[in-house]
């Protein structure tokens, strides 16, 4: 049995054995106390029903650290940069969350997403055209990262030449999330990201367009629905969240299909299965390992454990999505699965606003890739295959394939 003492959720050993560890935790310790690398006290929930309770933000939990511990909020990094990563809907409770989400939601309406289908297909084809004659590629750098970053950048009106900046800035933040020591290392990237967004806002005020950033600026300037801090933070969130989950969904999804040739054959032979297939890939290798941070609003007892006000609470999304109490044969990939109420995109009021876009991007990307490259296989001769560090995401850092 794996030792849970000093469990490091970001370690290579954990990433490699995560689902076996989750299985033991669900059975023996469904609310595990964790000492974070920076000394914070945290709790990891691994059962489906418990994760849903956390995600629905009942009265025990809050997304807003500043509301319960202003001193902790102020200690993480300077206020300007802390506001950049925190004054957005994902880190807010109602009524601020309701107001912020309503402003952005218009850009992610079903019709808007449907209208993007042809452009996503064009971008996908262009990326495959660039590597098709090479016989090999690194999936993340050559395909899974460029596709969603191009799509969200077009929505926001961000110049194509700037796309490369976001990979480092975003990765530095994601890999430091919930670790205040590493957050200090990521501070230069967060600071540079903030300066870039300020310049973008200044430029777009001079030359407004029909893009999402122009719409957000109008909400700030004309109707005063956004503060200046919320404007910058919302743009930051859209860039980061607008590609990170989809990169992992495409990379993890392709890995799952290549590891399960029978399911890959089904996918290729029956296009009608791609919709249920995407949902199964989301469940099987969930792109987000744990839900974004929540804190205990008050002291309470849960599963016989004494949780204190201010403790970090993690909803284990990847763990919950393999819970046998919710899913039949949870460790089996089955793209025909009917009962699949996974929580890969969260649950409750913080359910991922961009979920329909991520689903569409992954559906087009994976279907086109496996049809155009029929001999796809994992490059077993390469030593580059590895999972990303950091506790928030489950994604591949490098994923070499041949075809």
Image (cartoon, rainbow, N blue to C red):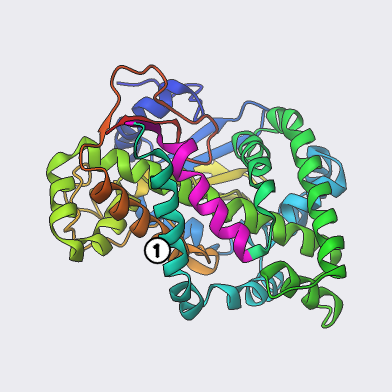
Stretch in magenta? 135-155
Residue 137 picture quarter: top left
| Residue where numbered disc 1 is placed | 360
Secondary element under disc 1, as helix, strand or loop, is: helix
Question: Which residue sits furthest bottom?
Answer: 223
Q: Is residue 237 left or right of residue 257?
A: right
Q: Is residue 168 left or right of residue 25?
A: right
Front residue (pair 22, 160): 160
| Residue appearing at x 53%, y 66% in the figure | 353
Whether residue 138 appears in magenta in the rendering, the answer is yes
Observer able to see residue 109: yes
Residue 23: x and y in percent read: 29, 36
Residue 129: x and y in percent read: 39, 46
Residue 189: x and y in percent read: 75, 37
Residue 28: x and y in percent read: 32, 35
Observer able to see residue 347: no
Q: Is residue 23 left or right of residue 263?
A: right
Question: Which residue sits furthest front?
Answer: 133
- Label 1 packing within 10 angstroms: few (<14), some (14-19), many (20+): some
């Amino acid at each position: 049995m794996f030792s849970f003492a000093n469990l490091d959720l970001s370690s290579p050993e954990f990433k490699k054995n995560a689902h076996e560890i989750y299985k033991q935790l669900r059975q023996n310790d469904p609310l595990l106390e964790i000492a974070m690398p920076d000394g914070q006290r945290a709790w990891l929930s691994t059962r489906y029903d418990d994760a849903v309770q956390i995600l629905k933000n009942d009265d025990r939990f809050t997304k807003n650290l500043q509301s319960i511990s202003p001193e902790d909020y102020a200690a993480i990094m300077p206020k300007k940069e802390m506001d950049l990563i925190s004054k957005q809907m994902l880190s807010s409770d109602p009524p601020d969350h309701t107001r912020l989400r309503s402003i952005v939601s218009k850009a992610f309406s079903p019709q808007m997403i449907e209208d993007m289908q042809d452009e996503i297909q064009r971008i996908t084809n262009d990326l495959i055209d660039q590597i098709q004659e090479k016989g090999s590629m690194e999936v993340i750098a050559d395909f899974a990262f460029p596709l969603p970053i191009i799509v969200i950048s077009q929505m926001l009106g961000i110049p194509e030449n700037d796309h490369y900046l976001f990979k480092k800035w975003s990765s530095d933040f994601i890999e430091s999330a919930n670790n205040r020591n590493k957050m200090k290392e990521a501070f230069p990237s967060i600071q540079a990201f903030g300066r870039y967004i300020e310049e973008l806002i200044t430029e777009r005020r001079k030359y407004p367009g029909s893009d999402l950033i122009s719409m957000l600026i109008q909400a700030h300037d004309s109707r005063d629905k956004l503060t200046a801090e919320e404007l910058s933070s919302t743009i930051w969130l859209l860039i980061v969240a607008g590609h990170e989950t989809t990169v992992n969904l495409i990379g993890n999804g392709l890995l799952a299909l290549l590891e399960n040739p029978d399911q890959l054959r089904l996918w290729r032979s029956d296009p009608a299965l791609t919709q249920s297939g995407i949902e199964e890939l989301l469940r099987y290798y969930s792109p987000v390992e744990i839900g974004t941070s929540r804190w205990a609003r008050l002291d309470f007892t849960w599963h016989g454990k004494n949780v204190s006000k201010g403790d970090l609470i993690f909803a284990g999304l990847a763990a919950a999505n393999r819970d046998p109490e919710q899913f039949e044969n949870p460790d089996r990939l089955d793209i025909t699965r009917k009962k699949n109420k996974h929580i890969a995109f969260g649950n409750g009021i913080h359910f991922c606003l961009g979920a329909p876009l991520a689903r569409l991007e992954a559906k087009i990307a994976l279907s086109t890739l496996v049809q155009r490259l029929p001999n796809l296989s994992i490059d077993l001769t390469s030593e580059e295959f590895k999972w990303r560090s950091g506790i928030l995401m489950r994604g591949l850092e490098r994923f070499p394939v041949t075809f």
